[in-house]
Image (spheres, rainbow, N blue to C red):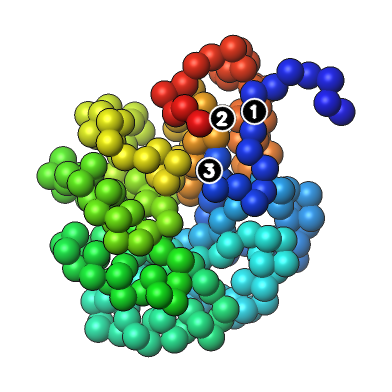
Amino acid sequence: MDFLKLPFRTKKFRKYGVTSISDFGVPIGELKNILEDYAPFIDFAKLGVGTAYMTPNVKEKINLYKEYNIAPYCGGTLFEKAYMQNKIDDYLLYLKRIDVDWIEISTGVLSIPIEERIRLVEKINKDFYVIGEVGSKELAKNDEIDWEMEMNALINAGCQYVTAEGRDSGTAGIYQKNGNVKQEILSDIFANVDHTKIIFEAPTAKSQMFFISLFGPNVNLGNVNIRDVLLLETERNSLRAETFFMEESKWTLQL
């Protein structure tokens, strides 16, 4: 079934062009059915907000994702809860116990200075792969962030990826309240950050197609609804009207 000319698309195990889905409590039986068909399109699975802590069969779910070569990790809100209660060491032991190898260090709810996040990355990356998130869930705070500086600082400290906050609604972080991308924030990122290491949170079709149109089919996207992964892969492969002519395009992200 290779008779169409489509854009170049990276394959698992890929370093860029990754799709990170959000799991807010998908039942294990339903998850098995989804992964049986769509696992090749998924690279990371974030157990959203603090759901991992409340999931009765969390170890079984973690093992299932790993069985399909998908890297699971817990949402940054759980990290921030542990940080607020001075329980980071306990949190790291918990992640080891449930066999999670990736950790997100975020500042979506709390205001954790970049220097403190760098210290944590340098401490934790000896035992975990680290994803550093930049951006706040509070709209007003995002205009005060030096996005380029924080992203580069986290990458230099040892993060495998940095996430641009967008929430599961696409209305915070790099987005305006109406869901439009804040162009001034993107302009800060364009020049001097390695785009292959940025995961743009893009929970809606509108936001996904924005980044695909700008960066091309191999942009890293996160907070994707697990039930939308086939549609997203269709968008990446120029098989949707909005991306139909993409194989003829030149993108900002040159690979």
Which numbered circle lies on residue 217? 2
Q: CA distance from mark 3 to mark 2?
A: 10 Å
Quarter holding residue 182: top left
Whichever of callouts 1 and 3 sits on the residue coming sooner in the sequence is 1
Badge 3 marks a residue whose secondary structure is: loop
Quadrant of the snapshot with the N terminus:
top right
Q: Nearer the viewer, mark 1 or mark 2?
A: 1
Mark 3: few/some/many CA within 10 Å (<14, 14-19, 20+): many
Q: Are marks 1 and 3 in contact (CB under 8 Å)?
A: no
Residue 175 visible somewhere in the drawing: yes
Quarter-of-image position of residue 111: bottom left
What's the amino acid at mark 1?
A: Phe
- Give the residue pinned by disc 1: 8
248 relative position to 131: left or right: right
* Crowding at mark 1 (Cα within 10 Å: few <14, some 14-19, many 20+): few
Tell me the residue at 45%/41% (across/down).
196
- Check disc 2 and give the amino acid type: Pro
Look at the numbered discs 1 and 2 and tell me whether their residues touch, using CB distance below 8 Å: yes
Residue 170 is at least partly visible in this image:
no
Q: Residue furthest right?
A: 1
First along the sequence among labels 3 and 2: 3
Q: Nearer the viewer, residue 102 or 29?
A: 102
Q: Which mark is residue 16?
A: 3
Whichever of labels 1 and 2 marks the residue nearer the N terminus, that label is 1
Q: Position of residue 200 (x, y in %)?
A: 41, 42
